[in-house]
Image (spheres, rainbow, N blue to C red):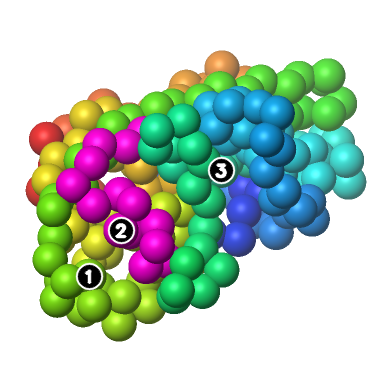
Amino acid sequence: MNIILASTSPRRRELLDLLSISFEVISPTCEEASSPDISPYEQAKQFALDKAESIAKQHQDDLVLGSDTVIEIDGSLLGKPEDIKEAEAMLRQLRGHCHQVHTGLALIHQANNLSIALVETAKVWIKPFNEDELKNYLETKESLGKAGAYSIQGQGAKLIEKIKGDYPAIVGLPLWHAAALLEEQGMKIGNSIEEIYLMKPYANWKEFL
C-alpha cells in the first residue's frame, strides 16, 4: 500500500518529508471554489476532502492525503490572491489584527471505505506594519499562491507578531495529525514526531514558540 499526497504545494511535500516516509505526489484534479453557505472551518475540511477524493478514485488501493489551508478574519474567508493587487488588499485587512488559520486534512483509502477528515486551527497576530514594509513584502511576490497573501516560513515571518497553535498547520500541513493518521493505518513513521516538534527542523519554525 502506497501513500499519495494529493497536492501541488512544495511546502506540504517538504513537511511530509520530515516524517522520513516514502510517498508519491500527484496533483489533485478538483477545483477550489469556496461556498458562501459553509464556514471557513468547514470549507478547509471540504477542500482537503475534495483533493484526496480526486486522486483516491484512480488509486483505490493507496492511502491518499489531502490538505488545504484557508484564512478566517471576522468570519470571512481569505483564500489565495489572484494577483498582487488582491494580495495587497488582503494584507491590509490582516494588518494589526489576529486571524485564524484553518488547515484541513483528509485521509482516504477507497478500498477499505476509509475517509477521515479533520481541521487544525491556529491563531496568527499580524504586526501593524508600515507602508514601506508592505511595499517591500509585496515586491518579493511571495504573497502569490499563499492563503492570506503571506508565507510564515518565508519573508512573511517578519510581518507576524506571534502565533498560537501548530506551526506546520500554518505552513500548510497538520504534521502531528498526519503522522497519527498514517500510523493508525499501519504505516511506519521513520522519524519520531515528538523529536520533530522538539527540534523544529523547518524554515522559521524556531522563531515561534
Label 2: few (<14), some or many (≥20) within 10 Å? Answer: some
Q: Which mark is residue 92?
A: 2
Q: Are circles 2 and 1 on residues that touch, CB within 8 Å?
A: yes
Of circles 2 and 1, which is in front? Answer: 2
Disc 1 target residue:
134
Q: Nearer the viewer, residue 206 or 87?
A: 87
Name the residue rendered at 56%, 68% in the picture: 82
Kindly report the distance in space between the C-alpha atoms of the residues bearing marks 3 and 1: 26 Å
Q: Is residue 93 magenta?
A: yes
Whichever of labels 2 and 3 marks the residue nearer the N terminus, that label is 3
Q: Which mark is residue 68?
A: 3
In the image, the segment drawn in magenta is 87-102
Q: Nearer the viewer, residue 171 or 26?
A: 171
Residue at the spot 82% in from the left edge and 20% down from the top edge: 112
**Circle 2 SS class:** helix
Q: Are marks 2 and 3 in contact (CB under 8 Å)?
A: no
Q: Quadrant of the N terminus?
A: top right
Viewer-nearest of discs 3 and 1: 1
